[in-house]
């Protein structure tokens, strides 16, 4: 392959040509880079100087504020534009705490700070927040006002309180909590060394209560992810708190080493501990395995056990929300991430199933077949399931059984028995998820926004395949939200303002939930996008708003068939046209890039408009690239009409019509020297196309290739550009040649003139 052709191919393919990454499991339909999001699609950023780690986010629609916790700071940002009207609270750790932290061997510039980990609404006027406090956890109340117009945002340092059991000591440790009423339920490490993990209830009027200490059957080095309060009946005494975490499995087989399992744990909100046993300890704590796996042959499933994040999607029935969970793998052989959905019915069924029990000569975990005491362990004391008014009234055998049997035998399986969305062999891992339920013309759809560890957000819509019981994920967009590719640590959605908020270690970002205009300017392109936020209004792809009547509105997320929706589109059939000129014997590139990365491009050719179209065949002279077709050594027979088609979702549409005219080398040189406007025509700001070809015309091909390579890679001074060729040298031209050679001879040392060209010019 010649040097010129090699350079052209590298330029056409770009940086992706050098990458050796495996192809992704799913390709986004639209991929937008950070500069384009900033310039055209409303991406806004906020960052503090000398701060980091924006982990805790609290979205408040009523106040119109986004509250955030960072290193040594609390933030209050406007939901409409986070880059405007910000309010800040400086909340560092006291000097003496930082010095103690440094004496304990911690880095005073990186670890001995106050990293805000907890941020909850406490009442109509105040927030409750906790931070690491330089390995001295501390909590406080923040006055935030009651209305959006109140410019109140201040912390009362006199009301600061001990944060042990609420916030972690170490900024690298995660904490999960929920504030229900005036009580805080936390999953956190309660010691400096990070070894005593507990599920802890604090605040409120009742005594603090926790899990059994140093019992691996309860918690075995857990990593807490999320906590939610879910009502179970009309009686508030039946309410439960659900904890999502991952921990080391106690039921694994011996000799297999540590195995991490995803878990869901439950406790009753009205649990006050036992009377004689489990005093100030949970008596209703149970946990079950959360399974997210791909069924394989012979029952060998591929499991995703690294639970990363959980989102609770509220439905019309508050007792039965949908649970969306993000997983990754810990395997060194298989790398991937997945999203699984769980129903509360399946979760409750697992906790009503058999208990796990260890027995037999090998102490294997089996289903407990003995008598289960009454009331059944895990049941809340209420009028619904019995006459017990408090957990202190439970019989001793119930308390002892609950103490030794916290693990359920049956796992919680995902809806559909498999992941909803899966990505394998990709250069990123899922980290966070937020879900928005969107009303479209043909039903309700769940749109998933998935954060990754490289600063991108995936937008996925779940559509029914054959029925609403079997869903199919569509990857609509991949958005580079953070330029520095830092992992996304939190995601929040404002359905009222149609905005997505993301955080990382370096900044906060705000982005609209939809970019309808980016899908294209035709009805078919808008329809094929299958975005429930967008619809064709007769002239453009715009935001779909329910309960508004427009005659030309077109939307079909489930099928996305342009043949049905766009049959009356007046723009259908209009194809952009472009005229190209190619020099015989040189290379010509036919460029056509569809907006959708999921579209398959098909090229057809016809000599004249009346001839039948035939597909362009790839061979040694015709090269297909990601951006079009490269014709090597153009021939007269290549002239004609080229039509670029895009095929997607069973629909084919023409994108571009190219008319190629092939001219001879001498004719091209003459036209160029004469300043022919046809040859000189070209887009403003771009190099006129024929200048590159003239370099091939005015000197032998090998010399031209060497000349291009030397200009790119030579360490010396580049040679001056060649003059245009205007035919065979006559008397005047010969004299000019002799003068040029004399000038080059006296230019100076050879090292300064640059490499010698093989051309006689």
Image: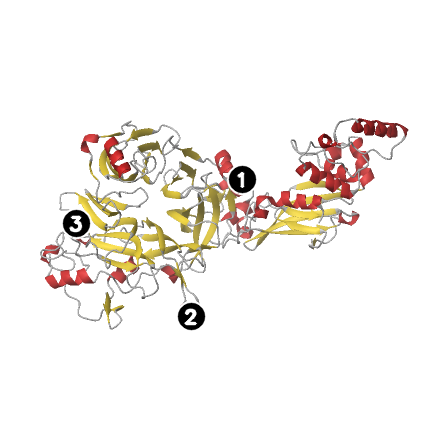
In the rendered image, the residue lying farthest to the bottom is 361
Which of the two labelled residues, at mark 2 and mark 3, occupies the earlier sequence position? 3
Residue at mark 2:
298
**Label 1 vs 3, first from the N-terminus:** 3
Quarter in which the C terminus is drawn: top right
| SS for dot 1 | loop
Question: How many neighbours does mark 2 have within 10 angstroms: few (below 14), some (14-19), or many (20 or more)?
Answer: few
| Front-most of residues 293 and 446 | 293
| Label 1 sits on residue | 539
Q: Is residue 666 left or right of residue 313?
A: right
Residue 633 place in picture, x, y as percent: 75, 47
Residue at numbered disc 3: 209
Q: In the rendered view, would you say 130 is above or below 19?
A: above
Give above or below for 687 relative to 365. Answer: above
Of callouts 1 and 2, the N-terminal one: 2
Q: Label 1 vs label 2: CA separation?
A: 54 Å
Residue 180, position as x, y percentages in the image:
22, 45
At x 44% / y 55%, what residue is drawn? 336
Colour mapping:
secondary structure
């Amino acid at each position: 392959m010649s040097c010129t052709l090699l350079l052209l191919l590298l330029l056409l393919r770009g940086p992706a040509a050098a990458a050796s990454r495996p192809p992704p499991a799913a390709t986004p339909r639209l991929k937008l880079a950070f500069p384009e999001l900033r310039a055209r699609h409303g991406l806004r950023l906020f960052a503090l100087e000398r701060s980091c780690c924006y982990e805790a986010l609290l979205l408040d629609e009523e106040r119109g504020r986004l509250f955030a916790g960072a290193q040594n700071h609390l933030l209050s940002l406007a939901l409409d534009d986070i880059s405007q009207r910000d309010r800040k609270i400086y909340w560092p750790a006291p000097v003496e705490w930082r010095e103690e932290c440094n004496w304990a061997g911690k880095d005073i510039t990186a670890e001995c700070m106050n990293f805000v980990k907890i941020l909850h609404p406490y009442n109509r006027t105040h927030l409750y927040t906790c931070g690491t406090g330089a390995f001295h956890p501390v909590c406080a109340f923040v006055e935030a006002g009651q209305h959006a117009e109140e410019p109140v945002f201040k912390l009362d340092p006199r009301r600061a309180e001990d944060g042990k059991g609420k916030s972690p000591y170490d900024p690298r440790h995660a904490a999960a909590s929920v504030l229900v009423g005036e009580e805080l339920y936390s999953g956190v490490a309660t010691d400096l060394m990070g070894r005593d993990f507990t599920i802890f209830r604090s605040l409120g009027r009742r005594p603090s209560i926790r899990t059994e200490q140093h019992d691996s059957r309860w918690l075995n080095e857990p990593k807490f992810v999320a906590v939610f309060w879910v009502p179970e009946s009309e009686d508030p005494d039946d309410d439960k708190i659900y904890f999502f975490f991952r921990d080391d499995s106690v039921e694994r087989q011996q000799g297999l080493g540590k195995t991490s399992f995803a878990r869901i744990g439950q406790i009753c909100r009205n649990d006050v501990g036992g009377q004689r046993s489990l005093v100030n300890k949970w008596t209703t704590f149970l946990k079950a395995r959360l399974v997210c796996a791909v069924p394989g042959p012979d029952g060998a499933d591929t499991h995703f056990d690294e639970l990363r994040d959980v989102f609770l999607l509220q439905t019309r029935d508050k007792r039965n929300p949908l649970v969306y969970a993000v997983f990754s793998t810990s395997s060194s052989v298989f790398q991937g991430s997945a999203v699984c959905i769980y129903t509360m019915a399946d979760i409750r069924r697992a906790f009503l199933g058999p208990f796990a029990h260890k027995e037999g000569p090998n102490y294997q975990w089996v289903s407990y077949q003995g008598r289960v005491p009454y009331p059944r362990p895990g049941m809340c004391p209420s009028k619904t399931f019995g006459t017990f008014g408090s957990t202190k009234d439970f019989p001793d055998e119930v308390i002892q059984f609950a103490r030794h049997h916290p693990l359920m035998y049956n796992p919680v399986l995902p809806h559909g028995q498999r992941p909803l969305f899966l990505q394998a062999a990709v250069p990123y891992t899922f980290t966070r998820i937020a879900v928005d339920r969107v009303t479209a013309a043909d039903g309700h759809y769940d749109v998933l926004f998935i954060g990754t560890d490289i600063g991108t957000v995936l937008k996925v819509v779940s559509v029914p395949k054959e029925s609403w019981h079997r869903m199919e994920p569509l990857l609509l967009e991949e958005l580079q939200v953070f330029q520095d590719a830092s992992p996304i640590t939190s995601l929040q959605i404002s359905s009222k303002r149609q905005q997505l908020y993301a955080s990382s270690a370096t900044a906060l970002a705000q982005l609209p939930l939809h970019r309808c205009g980016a899908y294209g300017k035709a009805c078919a392109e808008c329809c094929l996008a299958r975005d429930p936020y967008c619809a064709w209004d007769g002239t453009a792809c715009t935001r779909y708003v329910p309960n508004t009547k427009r005659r030309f509105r077109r939307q079909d997320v489930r099928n996305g068939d342009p043949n049905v929706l766009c049959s009356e589109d007046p723009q259908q059939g209009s194809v952009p046209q472009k005229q190209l000129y190619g020099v015989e014997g040189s290379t010509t590139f036919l460029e056509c890039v569809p907006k959708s990365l999921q579209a398959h491009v098909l090229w057809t050719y016809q000599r004249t408009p009346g001839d039948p179209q035939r597909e362009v065949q790839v061979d040694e002279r015709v090269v297909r690239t990601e951006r079009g077709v490269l014709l090597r050594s153009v021939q007269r027979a290549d002239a004609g009409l080229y039509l670029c088609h895009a095929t997607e979702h069973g629909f084919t549409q023409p994108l571009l019509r190219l008319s190629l005219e092939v001219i001879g080398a001498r004719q091209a040189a003459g036209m160029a020297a004469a300043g022919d406007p046809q040859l000189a025509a070209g887009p403003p700001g771009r190099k006129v196309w024929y200048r590159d070809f003239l370099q091939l015309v005015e000197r032998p091909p090998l010399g031209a290739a060497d000349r291009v390579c030397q200009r790119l890679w030579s360490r010396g001074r580049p040679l001056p550009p060649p003059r245009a060729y205007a035919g065979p040298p006559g008397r005047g031209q010969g004299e000019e040649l002799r003068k040029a050679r004399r000038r080059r001879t006296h230019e100076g040392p050879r090292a300064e003139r640059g490499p010698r060209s093989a051309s006689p010019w």
